[in-house]
Amino acid sequence: MNEIRMARGAHTVVNTCVGVKPGEQVLIITEGEKMPIAEAIAAAVYAAKAEPVLAVMLPRQRDGQEPPGPVAEAMKQSDAFVAVVNRSITHTHAVKEACKRGSRGVMLTQFSQEMMFHGGLEADFREVAPTCKAMAARLQGANSVHLTTPHGTDLTFCATGRRGNAMYCMVEPGEFSPVPTVEANVSPLEGTAQGVIVANASIPYIGIGVLEEPVTCQVKDGFITSITGGRQAAMLEKDLASKEDPNVYNIAELGVGLNPQCRFIGFMLEDEGVRGSVHIGIGTNITLGGNLKAACHYDLIMTEPTLLADGEMLLHNGQVML
C-alpha cells in the first residue's frame, strides 16, 4: 500500500521541487534501505518524460562524508539530482561542484516512506516561498544578528558579506534544497559568534532526535567550547570529540524553519522545517556561503526564538514577524 501512497509525494518532489522537464537526465542517488522511495521517485521522473538514472552506493559512515567519485561525477553531469539517503551528503564538495556546473538538487535525507505522504511534504511550497525569500533577504549581509530564547539561548554573530539562502523546496539551475524543510539561513562569519546555545527541541543526528532535556553549548570566537546537559548532550559531546577535527565545533549556520506542516519527529528535514523554530548548524559551512569544511554538519534546534538582524525583529517568541 505504501508504494501507492508514495506516488503523490514522488510527484511533488519531481514536478514541484525539482521541476523536471521532458528529456532531462535526473540522477537519483540512494542506498539499499531507501530503494522503495528511490524507485517511486524514478517512476515519477519517467512519467514526466525524463530519463531516471539510479546510482546505488554503500551507506555513508557519517553525515557529511563525500559520495564515491563516480557518483560525484554523475552529479556534475546531470540536469538534476535527488539524494535519497540516510546519512547526509548535503554539505559536501560533490553537491557544491554539481550546482556550480548548473545541476539542481533536492535532498531527501533520513526520509521514511511515511514522510512521502504525510507531514512537511504536504505543504504548499509556492505559497511559503515569498516569506522564505523575505527572511533570507533580511539575514543576508547583516552586520549584527542576535538570537535569544526563553530556554537560555543568547547568541550574537556577524554575517557581513554573507549570502542569505532561501530554501523553499523548489530549485533552479545551480541551486540545491533539502525537502521538506522550508528554511531561510545564513552562515556567520567565522570567529564572530559569541554566547550560548540551548537546544530544547531536537538534534536529529546520531540517534539523538527529539530532546528529553536541553543541551547547552557555550560559544566563544565562533566555536563551541563546552557541551553540557544530560544523556543526549553526552552523546553529542562524545561524537564530536571522536571526529578529531576542531572544525566540527564551528558555528556554521543560523536557519529559520518556515514549513507549517512540519512537526518534531526526530528526523532531520522534518524537525528543521518546523515553522517558527530556529536551528544552529555546526561544522561544515561551504555549501551555505562559508569557508570551512568539517567532518560533519549537525543542527541544534530550538523553539520560541526571538531573532533580530541589524535591529529588525524577524521572529518574536517563535512568531514570524515579516
Image: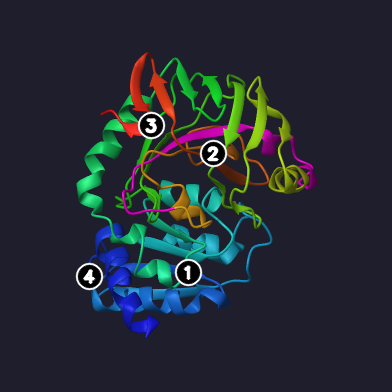
Q: Are marks 3 and 1 in contact (CB under 8 Å)?
A: no
> Measuring 31% from the left and 73% from the top, which residue is drawn there?
45
Give the magenta-colored segment's residue range.
241-263
Q: Which mark is residue 164?
A: 3
Pointer 3 local density, CA inside 10 Å: few below 14, some 14–19, many at least 20:
many
x then y, percent, for residue 290: 53, 32
Residue of label 2: 286
**Quarter-wise, where is residue 270 in the image?**
bottom left
Q: Residue furthest left?
A: 127
Q: Earlier in the sequence, mark 3 or mark 2?
A: 3
The question of residue 262 being in magenta is answered with yes
Q: What amino acid is labelled 2 in the image? A: Ile
* Local secondary structure at mark 3: strand
Q: Which mark is residue 193?
A: none
Between marks 1 and 2 in the image, the one whose residue lies nearer the viewer: 1
Between marks 1 and 4 in the image, the one whose residue lies nearer the viewer: 1
Residue of label 4: 22
Cα separation between marks 1 and 2: 27 Å
Q: Which mark is residue 112?
A: 1
Q: Are marks 1 and 2 in contact (CB under 8 Å)?
A: no
Q: What amino acid is labelled 1 in the image? A: Ser
